[in-house]
Amino acid sequence: MRSISGRSYHHGDLRRAVLNAAVEATAEAGPSGWSLRGLARRAGVSHAAPAHHFGDKTGLLTAIAAEGFGLLADALAEAAAGGDFADVGTAYLRFAIDRRGYFEVMFQPGLYRDEDPEVAAARARAGGVLHEGVHSVRGGAQDDRVSALAAWSIAHGFASLWLSGALAPDIGDDPEAAARPVLRALFGQ
Amino acid sequence: MRSISGRSYHHGDLRRAVLNAAVEATAEAGPSGWSLRGLARRAGVSHAAPAHHFGDKTGLLTAIAAEGFGLLADALAEAAAGGDFADVGTAYLRFAIDRRGYFEVMFQPGLYRDEDPEVAAARARAGGVLHEGVHSVRGGAQDDRVSALAAWSIAHGFASLWLSGALAPDIGDDPEAAARPVLRALFGQ
DNA sequence: CAATAGACTTGTCAATGTCAAGTTCTGTTT
DNA sequence: AAACAGAACTTGACATTGACAAGTCTATTG
């Protein structure tokens, strides 16, 4: 591996370059808005090089999902430390928007191998953090599970609707401001 | 047009046959799980026949979205007549599951021409019915808009999570039963 | 320095979306 | 009934893509 990023035979970190480019392209045009060959061109490598690292397109999407669930777990864990449910909801929304490329893949399991062990582990961790975050706020009420599910649903629903552009145009362009009263509507203030 | 469904030159109702097959295939394998050529084979016509009715694949997906928003508006309008918010939420969920092929397309505007006039009209109608349904239940509180958005978010979020298979496996296999307490969590009982 | 394994290339194939140019049917007009 | 117009479909072609097989280059290890 040469430190010069010139036209060496070895790219250096093709795996990361391709994955990042795929996430970026997904954010802009969805998972079918790019091709393995296009990513290869963009990275300056041959058309089959990406497949060496990911096997096939499904493999690349699987890697994106796994990394995405890990990043989501990190983001939620940080937000849950504050103790306010709305902060966790806001962090969820911010992840969906700022890391749209990951989010769009993660919740379309038909696109990737959702039984993949790395995906399953990261997804379980994210689910644990989310559940725990709601628990710490609610303080262990009897219907704890329902609360967590309701919280997840409302945050996920708002984020999905925002991303899909389905919300009325008069809602403005600040997703967090628009979401705050919606999230507050769930648990009283 | 011959009433015999034999191998006449004219299919009879190719447009509907292709659209229905596309919706069905989308429910099973997502919007990229089928091809125009595959639908043509399934209908027993030449590979370019579907394009005659829809222009291109995007056109077919646009037709699905338009019809889907119309069907959703119908379903919500019927449920809203009862006056119980949870019924509207349940109807939303049932639509997402029973008509998954439509639902999956509708909320991925990148797949179709979301500025299409028929789509825009049907979507506006569905949005109006939903908003009105929540309004009739809440009786015109001051934060009516927030309530409608929260209701839409929680119903849409639960439906999306259910469809994506992201929910824990111990939630059971009856989506409506699982959703009921979640929907109740929003507006008190 | 030889062996080895990983990283990447080259060549190829079937499938697909899309376009252009034809052919067949249907309904309407004369 | 004959001609016509337009809709419905076919046929043929091309560039792009995902996937596979086989080869080439390079770094590391012993």
Image (cartoon, coloured by chain):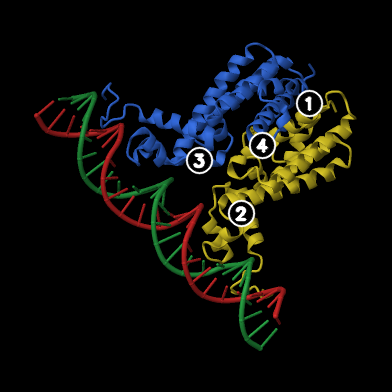
Chain colours: A blue, B yellow, C red, D green
Q: How far apart are marks 3 and 1 (CA)?
A: 34 Å
State which tag comes first along the sequence, 1 or 2.
2
Q: Are marks 1 and 2 on the same chain?
A: yes
State which tag comes first along the sequence, 1 or 4.
1
Q: Tags 3 and 4 in contact by the CB under 8 Å rule?
A: no
Residue B130 picture location, percent across and down = 80, 38
Q: Which of marks 2 and 3 is in front?
A: 3
Q: How far apart are marks 2 and 4 (CA)?
A: 20 Å
* Residue position marked by numbered label 3 in the rendering: A33
Please tell me how many numbered marks the rendered image carries.
4
* Residue position marked by numbered label 2 in the rendering: B22
Q: Which of marks 3 and 4 is in front?
A: 3
Q: Distance between the residues labelled 1 and 4?
A: 20 Å
Judging depth in this view, the residue of B91 and A18 nearest the camera is A18
Query: Disc 3 is attached to a residue of which chain?
Result: A
Quick check: can you spot residue B124? Answer: yes
Q: Which mark is residue B160?
A: 4
Q: Are marks 2 and 3 on the same chain?
A: no
Q: Few, some or many C-alpha atoms within 10 Å of disc 2 (few <14, some 14-19, many ≥20)?
A: many
Q: How far apart are marks 2 and 3 (CA)?
A: 20 Å
Q: Few, some or many C-alpha atoms within 10 Å of disc 3 (few <14, some 14-19, many ≥20)?
A: few
Q: Which of marks 1 and 2 is in front?
A: 1
The amino acid pointed to by label 3 is: Gly
Q: Is residue D28 left or right of residue A85?
A: left
Q: Which mark is residue B146?
A: 1
Residue B61 picture location, percent across and down = 61, 49
Tell me the element at label 3. Answer: loop
Position above or below: A76 against B47: above
